[in-house]
Image: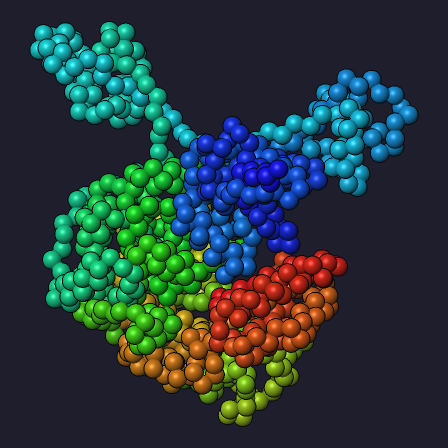
Amino acid sequence: GWPIMIDVAKVAIAHALYSFDQLYDYKIPEELLERIRPGMRVIVPFGASNKETEGMVMETVRIQPKGKLKTVKRIIDEKPVLDEQMLDLVKMMKTRYMCTWADAYRCMVPPGTSVKVIRTISLTEKGRMSDENLSDRFQPVIEALKNNNDTLTYNKLRQCVSIDRLSEVLKKMQEEGLVETFDQVQQSAREKTAKVIKKAVTDEKIDELIKGDFFKNIKYIRFLEVLMQVPYISTADAGKTLGISNYMMNRLVDDGLAEYDTVKVTRSPLFDIHVEGDEKKHPNEQQQQAIDGISELFGQNRFHSVLLYGITGSGKTEVYLQLIEKVLNSGRQVIVLVPEISLTPQTVTRFKSRFRRGIAVFHSRLSQGERYDQWMAVLEGEINIVIGARSAVFAPLPRLGMIIIDEEHENSYKSDKTPKYNALEIALYRCKSNDAMLLFGSATPSVNTWYKCETKRMHKHELTMRATEGGMPKVEIADMRMELASGNHSMFARATVEALKETFASGKQAVILLNRRGYSQYVLCTDCGEALMCPSCSLTLKYHKSSHRLICHMCGYTQKMPVDCPECGKKSLTIPGIGTQKAEEELMKLFPDIRILRMDMDTVTQKDSYRKILGDFRAKKADILLGTQMVAKGHDFPDVSLSVILSVDSMLYNEGYNAVEKAFQLILQASGRSGRGEEQGKVILQTFNPDHYAVQYAKNQDYKGFFQYEIDMRKLLEYPPFCNLGYITVESEDDKFAEFIAVRIKSSIDANYMLKGITTVLGPVKAPVERVADQYIWRIIIKSKNLNSLIRLMNGIRLDVETNMKTGKYRLSTDINP
C-alpha cells in the first residue's frame, strides 16, 4: 500500500528550555484542518505527562510520519498573529540572538495574551473510598486532596506534599483510576467593553420634537444634539462631562428616543494628551533638501538606509513629519522609534497634532490592557503610525514603508533581557524584507553608523543650522586640578557656582548632570588628570576593593594599586564617585532657597512620575533639574540657560571600549539642552583632564574631528566596527565554580572553534560589577572579523554547555556586540 501522508503542524513550545528547544511535529486533527495556519498559537500536549501547553505553529506540512504523533488540541488565535515575514524574523532571531523559539516569538505576539494552563487534580470516587494499604507514595496525595474538598491545582498540591517526581506519581494514580486531571486555559489581557447610549430615531424626528416643545428640560435638548453628532457616547462620559443622570438616560430609552449598547473600548494612552492642531512649518533650505533627497530614494520602492545628521535644534522632527506624510500618502505605514521612556509625551504631542488619527503608542510603562488594545488596533489595520521605545520595532504593520529611529546612538535600543536583540538590526531586517526605508536620525551618530556612511553603505543628509535663533551654546571647561590646588574641595567649581548664581538671578533654570551612581571605580590622579589604563587594551583599569588591585575587564591584566601616579610620580591618586543625593545636599548648602528636582532611577519609578517631573520643571516649579543620563535626553526646556556636567571623567573612564564615544555624545546632547529659546546658553564641563581629545572636540562641537580620531584608535586596537565582540557570561553563587565553568568553556573554544575570522579569545575574567544579587559573574570575550563565525561559535558553545556541563548551579548567557 501507499505510505500514509498526514497533515502536520511544526510547533515551537512556549516554555521550552534551550537544551530541548526545537520544532515538534503534531498531527492536525480533521476538525482543525481548514482553520489552522502558520502564525497561530495552539494548545498541544507536551512532555511525559502530556501537560497542555501553548505553542506557535511555525509551518504546516504534509509528511509521512515517523512513529506515532500527538495531536493539536485546539487553536488559541482565531487569525494568525504573525504573518510570513514575522515568522521569518523569528527564525532569524533564534540564530542571531541565541534564544529559544518562544523567546523570539513572544516579542511579536500581542502583549498580555500569553496563555497560562492551570492543571487541577481531583479525587475520583475510587480514590475517596481507597483504604490505608495503598502504596506509601500515593497516600500523602490522597490525604492532601481529602483535606481540600477533593480538588487542588497542581502547584498547590506540590506545596502540600513533599514527593520527588510528583508528576510520575500522579500519572500512575490516574492509570489506577484514583485521581483525574483537568487542564484549564487562562488568558491574561482581555478586551474591555463599555456601556454606551445612542439615538434610536432619525435626526428629523428629534428636530421635530425639539421644535414642538416636547422637552421641558434644556439638558435633554443639549444631550440629544450631541447624540445627533456622534455615533454613540459612553454612559460614563454622558454623566461626567454632560451631567446627564442615569434617570434621564433611562427616560430617553423608555420613550424610544435612545438605546443602550456595549462596544469594545480601546484603552488608549493617547487620550490624556490634549492637542491643538499643529501648523505645517515651512522648512528651511537644508530641511527642504533633506526632505526632497530622502523622498526621491523612498520613491524607488526598494530598500535604502539613510542617516539624517542634524545638530541639536536643527529641526529633525519637522523633516520626519513631512516624510511620514509622503509615506502615508503612498498608502504605506511607519514605525517611529524613540529612545527611553522620557521622550514619549513630547513626541506624541507633535505627531498627534499633525496626524489626527491612526497613531498608536507603545512604551514599557503602559498597562497590559493598554498594550493589548494598541496591538490589536495595529493588527486590525486601524493604525498607520506606531511610535514607541525599542519593542515597537515588532509592531505588525502589514504595509510597512519606513522605520525612523531617532537618536539612533542610544543604548536603550539594545535589549538587556533575553532575547538580547538590537532594535536597529531588527529594523534593518524588516525594512529589507519590505523594500522599505530605514532612516536614522541623530545629532551625535554612533561611530558605527558614521563609518557606514563614510564607506558608502548608507546615504547621509546633514542639517547644520539651528532652526531657532539662539545659536549653539558656549562651552566652558572647569579644570578641577586648579580648583583642588587652590583649596576648593567642593564638587562644584567656583566658575560653576558663579554661573548658577547668574542663572537664578536672571530667572532662568539649570540642568546638572552626573553619571550613574556608584558605578565607576576608576583611579584618577588629581594632579595630572590621567586615569590608570590597561597597557594592552587602552581601557580604564577598575579598582577592586576586596583585593586592593586594579583589573582590566577586557583581557584580565591586573596590578597592585600603586602609591604614586605612574604618569607624573605624585601621590595624588584617588577613586572618585558622586551620587545624586550627595550632590543635592551640597547644592542645598550653597543655595538654601533654590528648588531642586532630582531625576534618577530612585525618583522615576511610577508609571507617570517622569512625565510629572519633566512637566513640573517645564512649568518652572523648580530651578535645578539634577540627575543621571535621563536628564540629557532630547527634552525641550525653553528656560534652561545653563547645563553643568559635574564629572566628565567618570564618563570618559567608564566601562567598555566605547566609553569615550558615549561620553562625547552625552556632552554634546547636554549642551543641546541649554539655550533652546532665543538667547545663547552656556555649558560647563568639570574635568581633571581638560586636554582629553573628547573634551576638546566636544568643546568645539566638532563631531567629525572626534569621529576621525576615534575611528583611527579603534582600527589600531581592533574594536568595532573593525570586529564583532562576543560575550559569554557565567553566573553562579559560588565564585570558584563560576570560574571553573568559564575556564572549561575557554578550553573548549580553543580546541574546537577557531573558525575563520576569529582573532582573539580573552579571559575568563571577572565582570566589571563582579557580584550582582549574590551571583558572581565571570566572562569570556571573543573578537571576530566574521559575524557568522561568531554566531556559529556561540551557538555551538551554548549547546555544548547545556548538554555536557550539567553539574552544579550556574547560568550561562551570550551576547554579541552589546
Query: For this rendering, which residue is in front, 553 or 307?
Result: 307
Residue 635 appears at what percent x and percent y? 30, 58
- Extreme residue toward the left, this view: 211
**Residue at x-position 14% and y-position 52%:** 280
Query: For this rendering, which residue is in front, 693 or 741?
Result: 741
Q: Is residue 397 above or below residue 443?
A: above
Colour scheme of this structure image? rainbow
**Residue at x-position 20% and y-position 71%:** 464
Query: For this rendering, which residue is in front, 787 or 677?
Result: 787
Would you say 468 lies left or right of 36 here?
left
Query: For this rendering, which residue is in front, 457 or 539?
Result: 457
Image quadrant where residue 471 sits: bottom left
Would you say 742 lies left or right of 197 here?
right
Q: How many marks?
A: 0
Residue 607 appears at what percent x and percent y? 42, 45
Image quadrant where residue 660 sits: bottom left
Residue 713 appears at what percent x and percent y? 42, 83
Image quadrant where residue 645 sits: bottom left
Residue 300 appears at what percent x and percent y? 22, 60
**Residue at x-position 28% and y-position 63%:** 304
- Extreme residue toward the front, this view: 1
- Extreme residue toward the right, this view: 133
**Residue at x-position 67% and y-position 75%:** 751
Residue 476 visible in image:
no
- Extreme residue toward the bottom, this view: 569
Quadrant of the image containing the N terminus: top right
Residue 132 visible in image:
yes
